[in-house]
């Protein structure tokens, strides 16, 4: 079995860099919609990295990977709902 320490190390570096980018993006002064899209896309990337490397999904069968990918359309539908709701100010 091959040594995965190098893979874990570079994945941890990538996750740390994405976290720094997320924190940096908040201070950019982007419009609210653009900021939400940027942060959610970075979050999805981080979720994929964790699932593929630390949960060892990249070594699983195609069937299992497809089964795990089924909720992604639901997440996109939820994202659409959040983006639609952002147009309204719900503060009292």
Image: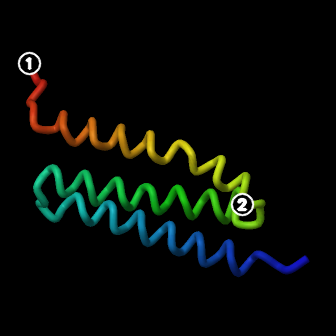
Coordinates of residue 46 in the picture (x, y in percent)? 49, 60
Which of pointers 1 and 2 indicates the residue nearer the eye? Answer: 2
Q: Quadrant of residue 83?
A: top left
Q: Residue at x 43, y 72 (%)?
A: 17
Q: CA distance from mark 1 to mark 2?
A: 49 Å
Query: Considering only order in the chain, which callout, 2 or 1, is on the residue closer to the N terminus?
Result: 2
Disc 1 residue crowd, few under 14, some 14–19, many 20+, Cα 10 Å: few
Q: Residue furthest top?
A: 92
Coordinates of residue 92 in the picture (x, y in percent)? 8, 18
Q: Label 2: which residue?
A: 62
Q: Secondary structure at mark 1?
A: loop
Q: Nearer the viewer, residue 22 or 48?
A: 48
| The label number, if any, that marks residue 92 in the structure image | 1
Please say if the residues under marks 1 and 2 sit with CB atoms less than 8 Å apart: no
Is residue 60 shown left or right of residue 22?
right
Q: Quadrant of residue 91?
A: top left
Is residue 63 shown left or right of residue 41?
right
Coordinates of residue 54 in the picture (x, y in percent)? 69, 60
Q: Quadrant of residue 3?
A: bottom right
């Amino acid at each position: 079995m091959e040594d995965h320490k190098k893979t874990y190390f570079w994945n941890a570096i990538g996750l740390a860099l994405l976290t720094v980018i997320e924190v940096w993006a908040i201070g950019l002064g982007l419009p609210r919609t653009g900021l939400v899209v940027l942060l959610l896309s970075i979050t999805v990337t981080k979720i994929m990295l964790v699932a593929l490397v630390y949960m060892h999904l990249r070594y699983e069968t195609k069937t299992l990977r497809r089964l795990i990918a089924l909720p992604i359309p639901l997440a996109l539908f939820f994202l659409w709902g959040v983006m639609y709701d952002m147009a309204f100010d719900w503060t009292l």
